[in-house]
Image (cartoon, grey):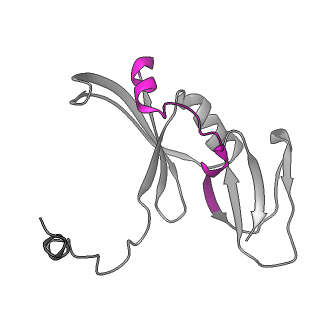
């Protein structure tokens, strides 16, 4: 196929941007450890969980998994998969950690309200500016910054 034909066959772009992110999913080893981090430490509520087993054509066998969703104020969610078989977990995660891991993160826009989590080992105080705040959370890094 010539380049001109490929450009002509290009699907139409969206008429408008997506209204919001429905969910973004990640694979985790342990749903309960993950729940304690997001719900108990950060205060982001777990709103849905379901477990199922389905035939995975890539693996050629049934795969048992649980899927959890943590609520965002706009109706979106942060979602996680965990698999009943540790071998499946090994197959679906990245082969090796990134040499520079600081780019893998989730950032939330939050209000500028005072927040204290002394048990987590970090504190954030109300600032005089009204700048939006982004809380960046990962298991290896917990920090708060303005932007």
**Residue 5 higher or lower than 116, as above or below:** below
| Quarter of the picture holding the N terminus | bottom left
Quadrant for residue 15, please give it: bottom left
Task: Provide residue 62's location: percent of width, then percent of height.
Answer: 25, 22
Quadrant for residue 126, please give it: bottom right
**Residue 98 higher or lower than 144, as above or below:** above
**Residue 60 higher or lower than 117, as above or below:** above
Q: Residue drawn 45% across and 24% down?
A: 90
Decide whether residue 50 is among the magenta residues: no
| Quarter of the picture holding the C terminus | bottom right
Quadrant for residue 125, please give it: bottom right
Decide whether residue 86 is among the magenta residues: yes
- Stretch in magenta: 84-108
Q: Is residue 113 left or right of residue 25?
A: right
Q: Is residue 18 left or right of residue 120?
A: left
Q: Residue drawn 52% across and 33% down?
A: 28
Task: Provide residue 52's location: percent of width, then percent of height.
Answer: 31, 29
Q: Is residue 19 left or right of residue 95?
A: left
Q: Residue furthest front?
A: 2
Please tell me how many numbered marks the rendered image carries.
0
Q: Residue drawn 88% across and 76% down?
A: 128
Task: Provide residue 78's location: percent of width, then percent of height.
Answer: 50, 50
Residue 30 or residue 49, whichever sits in front: 30
Q: Residue drawn 37% across and 28% down?
A: 65
Task: Provide residue 106's location: percent of width, then percent of height.
Answer: 60, 53
**Residue 100 higher or lower than 22, as above or below:** above
């Amino acid at each position: 196929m010539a380049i001109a034909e490929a450009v002509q066959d290009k699907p139409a772009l969206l008429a408008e941007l997506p209204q919001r992110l429905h969910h973004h999913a990640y694979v985790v080893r342990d749903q309960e450890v993950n729940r304690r981090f997001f719900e108990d430490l950060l205060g982001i509520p777990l709103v849905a969980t379901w477990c199922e087993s389905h035939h995975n054509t890539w693996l050629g066998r049934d795969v048992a998994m649980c899927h959890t969703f943590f609520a965002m104020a706009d109706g979106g969610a942060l979602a996680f998969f965990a698999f009943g078989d540790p071998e499946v977990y090994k197959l679906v995660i990245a082969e090796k950690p990134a040499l520079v891991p600081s780019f893998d993160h989730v950032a939330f826009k939050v209000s500028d309200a005072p927040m204290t989590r002394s048990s987590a080992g970090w504190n954030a105080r109300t600032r005089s500016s009204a700048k939006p705040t982004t809380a960046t959370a990962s298991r290896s890094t917990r920090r708060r910054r303005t932007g």
